[in-house]
Structure formats: structure tokens, C-alpha cells
Amino acid sequence: MSANRSQAIRLADFARVSTGDVDEAAEQIGRIFCPHDLQPLRARAAGFYARHNCATFDGFSINYVAYGGSVTIDPGCLESFFLVQIPLRGSTKIRAGSQDFATSPGAVASLLSPTVPTRMVWHDCAQLILLLDRRMVEQRAAALSGKSAGAVEFDSAIDLNAPAARSLCAGLDELMTLAERLGPAGRLPAVAVADWRETLLDHLLNGQRHDLSDAITTFSGRAERLPRALRAARDCLEANAIEPLDLDQLACASGIGIRALQLGFRRHFGLSISEMLLDIRLAHLHARLLHAAPGASITDIAFDLGFTHLGRMAGAYREKFGETPSATLRRRVS
């Protein structure tokens, strides 16, 4: 993320809180996240302000939160959600459980688990924050590890120079940019929301270290009833391609665990599940363009199929079919 981009106020059209009053900030932001103690470190709250912009989706939200001055934030245990906090400017000092660390742009971020008591000090700080529903994360972790659903606790510090962290940051920036493009009145199709949920869960549970990481690795290597299971999963993917991606449904149809399914697709098809789904959806887009009604909009058709990055879609479409979507639309079947 560029320096200029990191200094910008993100999600400006999604403003929820903007105040210079400490008590008002604690109350309003507490309603969005969870109740917490908020205290300026300087006398008379010199330089204090609070800003919170928030775009919500089913199961997660993307947020821009900034505090002027230095403040302590003590939420205790978050209880109902996980928080990924990517610093855009300023710095924080965090105590999560028994772990103490500092975060800063381009160096270290934080991943707060709902069962770990947390206390933070923000110094003139702005952060991109991803909130994920606790139950959603824990159920997926259980499916990946072969264990019953229960608490999941992540390593709280994220090295932003690690490849998995860079991929996570790029995804979050893309999600925030998408929300900004849609605006508060925009609608992200259920297909696209489900795709983002799967992407974010994969970034966290397969990309960041947590107390079930080893169990997931072990469980993923157990089921190699392939390629029959993979063919069943591929057929399920094809039959439900225009529906929101549901890895639990896919694993159930194939009879193997989610992680084994993910690894099996790469090993046997040379594609990730998402890449194969993209290929299938491109085929659906091609068919719909060929039979589109006069005046049909490529953007509307693509959006309904879950494509939210039109430039990327157009590039993939041209690579697959050797022509642009507009060229296909021009020669549609009457």
C-alpha cells in the first residue's frame, strides 16, 4: 500500500463515528465493536479525536478506525469476534494475554482472538480493521481440523513482511476498495459475499498461525480417497456455480475434509477451488452473453455471477475465450 494511500481516510462514505468527545467515542464505537474502556493518556484529552467508518457484510465487516493523540483501549475479551488490525499510520502497543508487542505500518499487525484479554495503547493511529464473526471462524476451524467446534486462539502478532501477511493485506485493501466503489447504497451479490468469506477464512486459518494449525495439517493429509472425491466436488461446484461458494457443502458432497479438498484440487487439477470456480463462472458468463437480450449490460451480468473486479474478469475472459466480453455480446445469438 502506498504512503499516500495509507494516509487517506478510507471508507469516508461509511462514516459511523466522528467526534472529539472521549465519552461519546467510547459509547458509539463500543456499540459497533464491544463495550470498552477508552482513556486519553494526555491531560484534558489534548489532540483527541475518534473516527470510525464501517462497511458491513454477512459474517464480517471492513473498518477504518483512527484516534488522534494517545489513548488506551481496554476491551478485555472481545467475546463474539476476531479482529485483524493493519496499521496505516502511527503505532500501537498491545498486550494480548501474556504477549506484549508493538505494531506499525509495514512491519507488524495484530490479530486479536475473542477469548484472549487485550489492552492497547494507540498513538496517533489509523488502522484498517477486519472483523470476523467468532462462530463462523470456529466452525470452519473445526471442519478443517476434524475436531468439534471450540475456541481458536491465534498468534496475536502478524509479521507484515511474511508472504501470507502480504497476501492478506492485499486482499483487505481490495475489499475496502470494492466497498468504496459500491458505496453505502451499493449491493454486493450473495455470490460475491460468500467468495469473500471463503477467501478471508482461508487467509486466516491456513495463512496465520493458531492453536489448531498443526491439527489442520495432520487432518488434511488423512483423506486421499481421490480422484473420485474430487470429481464429486467438481460436479457439485459446477451444479452450484452461480450460488455462493460453500466449502462445507463441497466437502460433504465429496466425503473428505475441506483442507484435503483444497490440496487435492491443486494436486490433481492444477487449480485451486477458487480458480476452478472462476473458470466455471467464466463459462456461464460466456453463455449468458451469447444469449443476452438487446441492451443487456455486461457489468450487470458479470456482477450477478459474482464478478466484482471487472478488469480482472475481462482479462481472464479474454485469456479463456480469445475475445473480450463485449465482442461476445456483439455476436450474441438472436
Image (cartoon, rainbow, N blue to C red):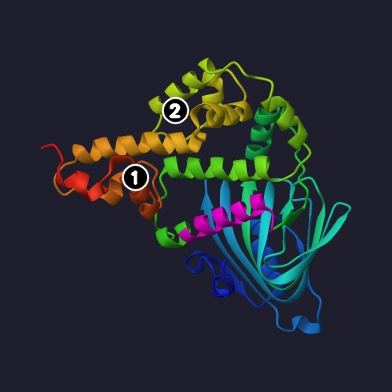
Q: Residues within 10 Å of mark 1 (few under 14, many from 20)?
A: few
Q: Which residue is at a point 69% across and 54% down the rendered structure image?
A: 162
Q: Residue 270: x and y, percent?
A: 50, 32
Please name whichever residue, 267 or 235, is drawn nearer the observer in this view of the structure: 267
Secondary structure type for disc 2: helix
C-alpha distance separating marks 2 and 1: 22 Å
Q: Quadrant of the C terminus?
A: top left
Secondary structure type for disc 1: helix
Q: Which residue is at a point 63% across and 47% down the rendered structure image?
A: 132
Residue type at mark 2 is: Leu
Residue occupying the far right of the picture: 98
Write down the region rendered in magenta. 161-177
Q: Residue 233: x and y, percent?
A: 49, 23
What residue is disc 1 on? Answer: 319
Q: Mark 2 near mark 1, Cβ–Cβ under 8 Å?
A: no
Residue 102 among those drawn in magenta: no
Residue type at mark 1 is: Glu
What residue is disc 2 on? Answer: 237
Q: Residue 1: x and y, percent?
A: 57, 66
Q: Residue 227: x and y, percent?
A: 53, 18
Give the number of the disc on residue 265: none
Q: Which residue is at a point 62% across and 55% down the rendered structure image?
A: 166
Horizontal placement of 82 versus 240: left or right? right
Q: Nearer the viewer, mark 2 or mark 1?
A: 1
Horizontal placement of 250 versus 110: left or right? left
Residue 166 among those drawn in magenta: yes
Please name whichever residue, 228 or 141, is drawn nearer the observer in this view of the structure: 228
Reply above or below: 86 against 248: below
Horizontal placement of 265 versus 210: left or right? left
